[in-house]
């Protein structure tokens, strides 16, 4: 018997995203499609395990090693309490801020190249949402910029 809740619906959505990514990755050439193929396969496998552990009681004892934390995944112990209501509002505000960041990232991608937009997004996101120091944010975003350049420009010879 399957019991489906908000978390289960989200996991099914992510499973669909993984399947779509896997299907699209098979249309790329062998070199360029390898990374999306592997990542989407991992997404499919992990999301399937998480879905089964949470929504199929008969399998949850076998998949007990899976520990979930975050929005949509924690069980609410005292539904309706003021503390839970406040926590839910804070979680949804975090989610809304994340969506705003992603929309802003997509808008910036329309004006600058990927090699500029991703490190810039990471720098600002890590600094302001992650509450990290400028030093940590700069090191992380510069590292990601270098990694992207080496992977896409040098190794895969792809252009954006």
Image: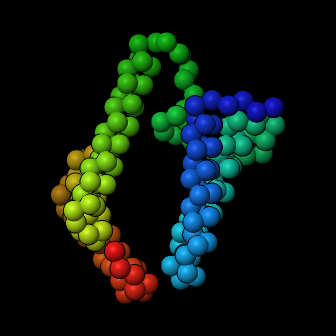
Residue in the picture at 46% in, 12% down: 81
Question: Percent x, y for residue 142?
Answer: 25, 70
Residues 24 and 146: in front is 24
| Relative to 132, residue 86 above or below | above
In the visual, does 42 lie left or right of 145? right
Question: Percent x, y for residue 18?
Answer: 59, 56
Quarter of the image where the N terminus is located: top right
| Relative to 154, residue 134 above or below | above
Question: Percent x, y for residue 76?
Answer: 54, 23
Residues 18 and 128: in front is 18
Kindly tell me whether residue 26 is visible in this rendering: yes
**Quarter of the figure with residue 93:** top left
How many numbered discs sit on the rendered protein? 0
Residue in the picture at 34% in, 74% down: 160
Q: How is the image coloured?
A: rainbow
Residue in the picture at 49% in, 12% down: 80
In the visual, does 94 lie left or right of 79? left
**Quarter of the figure with residue 99:** top left
Q: Most extreme residue toward the left, as rendered?
A: 134
In the visual, does 144 lie left or right of 35? left
**Quarter of the figure with residue 115:** bottom left
Residue in the picture at 58% in, 31% down: 6
Residues 1 and 106: in front is 106
Question: Percent x, y for residue 122?
Answer: 28, 59
Kindly tell me whether residue 126 is visible in this rendering: no
């Amino acid at each position: 018997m399957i019991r489906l809740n908000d978390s289960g619906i989200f996991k099914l959505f992510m499973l669909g995203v993984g399947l779509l990514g896997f299907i699209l990755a098979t249309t790329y050439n062998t070199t360029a499609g390898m990374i999306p193929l592997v990542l989407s396969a991992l997404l499919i496998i992990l999301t399937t395990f998480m879905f089964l552990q949470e929504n199929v009681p008969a399998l949850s004892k076998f998949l007990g090693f899976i520990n979930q934390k975050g929005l949509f995944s924690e069980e609410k112990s005292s539904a309706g309490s003021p503390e839970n209501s406040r926590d839910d509002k804070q979680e949804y505000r975090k989610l809304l801020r994340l969506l705003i960041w992603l929309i802003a990232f997509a808008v910036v991608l329309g004006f600058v190249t990927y090699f500029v937009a991703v490190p810039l997004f990471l720098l600002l996101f890590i600094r302001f949402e992650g509450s990290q120091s400028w030093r940590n944010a700069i090191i992380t975003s510069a590292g990601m910029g270098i990694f992207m350049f080496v992977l896409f420009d040098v190794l895969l010879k792809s252009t954006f």
